Image (tube, helix red, strand yellow):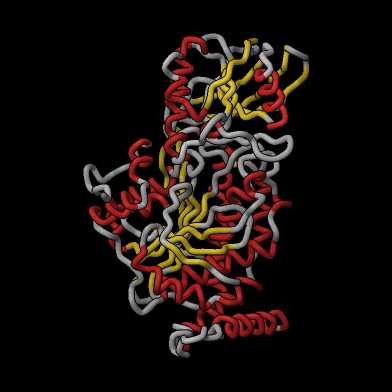
Amino acid sequence: MTRKMLVCACAAAFLSAIVRPAASAPGQSATEGAVPFDDATLTSLGAVAGAGMMETNTYENLRELSDDIGARVTGSPGAARAIAWGIQKMKSVGLENAHAETWQLSRGWTRISARAELIAPIHRSLMIDSLGWVGSTPAGGAEADVVEVNAYQLDEEMKDPSRWKGKILLVIHKGEAPTDRMASFAKFGDFLKAAHQTGAVAVIGGQGGGVAQGMHLTHTGVLGFDTYYDIPVVSMAAEDQEQLERYLERGRTVRLQMDVQNRVTDGHVESANVVGDIRGTEHPEQITVVGGHLDSWDLASGSTDNGFGATATLGAAEAIIKSGQKPRRTIRFVLFTGEEEGLLGSIAYVKTHQSEMPNHIAAVILDNGQGPVIGLQLGGRADLIPVVQKFASALGAFGKLKVDDDVEFGTDTGPFILAGLPGINLDQDSPEYKYTHHSAVDTFDKVPADILDRDATVMALTAFWIADRRDRLASPWPQEKTAQMLVDKHQDAILKLFGLWPFGNLGSSQQ
């Protein structure tokens, strides 16, 4: 009884914060500053907020996922355990039809070991880890001199790759950086193919040639969308890499012994998304997707990338169910896999549900680290900014939430945007994420419990508001309109580079 009274009090407090209009700016009428919700909506949102902050098991779920299951590389036994765990959690919170939707990854990959030693000018061990979905050195490793390759001038570098034969290639960054970071990332794949064909031993350079962030850290990751490269590619601790660069700048010969061993399957492996619903009361066929990705990398337990988003998704579901509120439309909660290998689970979801996509309304995704949600990015849907801004402005208890039409293809919003839907990225302020993600310090202790509960609650409120509106928030745009928006947002070139552009010749560049 005492707990129920506390929850009711919390809900009332949130209700008060949500309904309180912001002070009218000079020249603004009271009507312009008013909260855009009726009493029934305010009551429902207040109940969801109270349950989200007081009644969910979100942080304990993250502890279980991090400590009891651990790393969850797509296609691995750890990922399979996580999928079973996700189904069980969805059933335990009361989601309907909780199940796995299988899809296939082109090949599986397992990290075995990575070791490097500086042989000359001095002798000492170096810190490295392999990137994902790359190959191995010969058994026992190889010894080779190091040569530089400038990531900012790859076109020029690839004109004469013959000097790479039998060498370890160190990716450096000199001169003016390319303006299009993702296009540069795509070009890095061509460089890796050329390096392998020429007979290079290995490449030192992280995702897209990036340098490891933080002190004594490496960062793993893939180098393309569902792509495997035969050449071993490693991330090296910045302190070690900078020492090699200093030697080379002084004209010294740098020689390494490197042994990288990975295992790759010959064919497809199976993975699955975890799916469960809160069925709508009036329009159950209309669906709002809410999700984060369940898979992770394997240097740690994947707590910030993206155990945070996965358990926030479960927490959002639990908050809505425990609030007792019933949305008019269906809310579908999805724990995607394969995000780290190129949005593969969300691509599979859209493909599996292709016939239902006209009845999908939006996708709300959380995958930007361990910080507080500070904005809603609407995936190119500028038409929705006014109405979503009114909703966001009313959530005063959670701080200021910026609303814009930015397009995010770095996580599972992407396939929904390509389907013409508002792929809503819950943008977060996570300054430490550049250190934790894909690294050995992506662990449970890096996640603040209060921020996780807060973000899960924002996620729940956003999903419930979309699903329970009297009128439908959005319908999918036709292909022509989506294609033109992506051209206007300068997203078409990179999508074409990665083979993700589904619109043929639709969309024209602005003059």
Q: Nearer the viewer, residue 277 or 164?
A: 164
Q: Nearer the viewer, residue 129 or 434?
A: 434
Name the spot of residue 114 as percent of width and height, x first. Answer: 66, 23
Q: Which of 111 and 37 is in front in this view?
A: 37
| Residue under the image location 55 percent in, 36 percent down | 221
| Residue under the image location 66 percent in, 63 percent down | 451
Name the spot of residue 204 as percent of width and height, x first. Answer: 60, 24
**Quick check: can you spot residue 239?**
yes
| Residue under the image location 58 percent in, 43 percent down | 296
Q: Quadrant of the N terminus?
A: bottom right
Left or right? Give the position of 425 relative to 492. right
| Residue under the image location 54 percent in, 42 percent down | 80
- The extreme bottom residue here reads 30
Left or right? Give the position of 350 relative to 91. left
Q: Residue 313 appears in which quarter of the rendering? A: bottom right
Q: Residue 501 appears in which quarter of the rendering? A: top left
Task: Indicate whether 501 appears above or below 428.
Answer: above
For the image, the number of numbered tags is 0
Name the spot of residue 492 as percent of width and height, x first. Answer: 33, 44
Name the spot of residue 481 as percent of width and height, x first. Answer: 26, 56
**Quick check: can you spot residue 115?**
no
Q: Nearer the viewer, residue 430 or 292?
A: 430
Left or right? Give the position of 407 relative to 370. left
Task: Indicate whether 487 appears above or below 8.
Answer: above
